[in-house]
Image (cartoon, grey):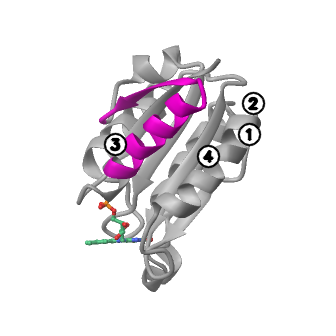
Amino acid sequence: MAEISIFVGSVYGGAEELAFTLAEEIKSNNHQSQVYLPGTVNDVKNATHLLFVTSTTGAGDIPAELEALYLELNNQFPMLTNIPYGIITLGDSSYDDTFCGAGRKIDLLLQELQAMSCIEKLEIDACEDFEPDKPALIWLKSFLKAF
Ligand SMILES: Cc1cc2nc3c(=O)[nH]c(=O)nc-3n(C[C@H](O)[C@H](O)[C@H](O)COP(=O)(O)O)c2cc1C
């Protein structure tokens, strides 16, 4: 059984709602999870399994509260060596170059902190998937098998 720490960034609530849906599904798969909105550097450092669920705002930006955590992580630079992580990003492909930029930034930082990407991040396009739960729950199955 794994304990998965879910860090959430959301502006209008879509990513937050998705995070709680994922937490329920994690429980049904006999694992545990904790949702952080958005949590602290210590919460990240103490995690055994990391899952970031974030939308993208502005021009490829991380929603404000999660961005504050991202900046703290970038400043303190705690090594997260070999901690498995996954990322789900909500975005909209009509934003072209900045599509799902929030998840891409978080992915780069986690790689720099030596965390272990155990599965390719999921980018959900609001233009294609009106219900983010569907692709996210399929992805979650693979994520739970990947560590
Ligand atoms: C003001 C604004 C800026 C956005 N900027 C981007 C962006 O740069 N890239 C992207 O992929 N999606 C962008 N989006 C789309 C959102 O990420 C997408 O609608 C997401 O589903 C919102 O999730 P939330 O309800 O958790 O905030 C933007 C949406 C808004 C309203």
Say which residue label 2 marks. Answer: 147
Say which residue label 3 marks. Answer: 66
Residue at 32% from the left image edge and 35% from the top image edge? 38
Position in image of residue 68 (x %, y %): 31, 39
Circles 2, 1 touching at the beta carbon (< 8 Å): yes
Is any atom of residue 137 visible in this view? yes
- The earlier-in-sequence mark between 1 and 3 is 3
SS at mark 4 in the image: helix
What kind of residue is marked 3?
A: Leu
Range covered by the magenta-colored residues:
17-37
> Would you say 29 lies left or right of 34 here?
right
Nearer the observer, disc 4 or disc 1? 4
Position in image of residue 73 (x %, y %): 45, 31
- The earlier-in-sequence mark between 4 and 1 is 1
Residue 62, magenta (yes or no): no
Q: Is residue 3 above or below residue 131?
A: above
Say which residue label 1 marks. Answer: 118
- The earlier-in-sequence mark between 3 and 2 is 3
Is any atom of residue 117 visible in this view? no
Position in image of residue 2 (x %, y %): 62, 20
Say which residue label 4 marks. Answer: 140
Q: Is residue 17 above or below residue 83?
A: below
Disc marking residue 73: none
Position in image of residue 49 (x %, y %): 60, 26
What kind of residue is marked 4?
A: Leu
Residue at 57% from the left image edge and 62% from the top image edge? 135
Q: CA distance from mark 2 to mark 1?
A: 7 Å
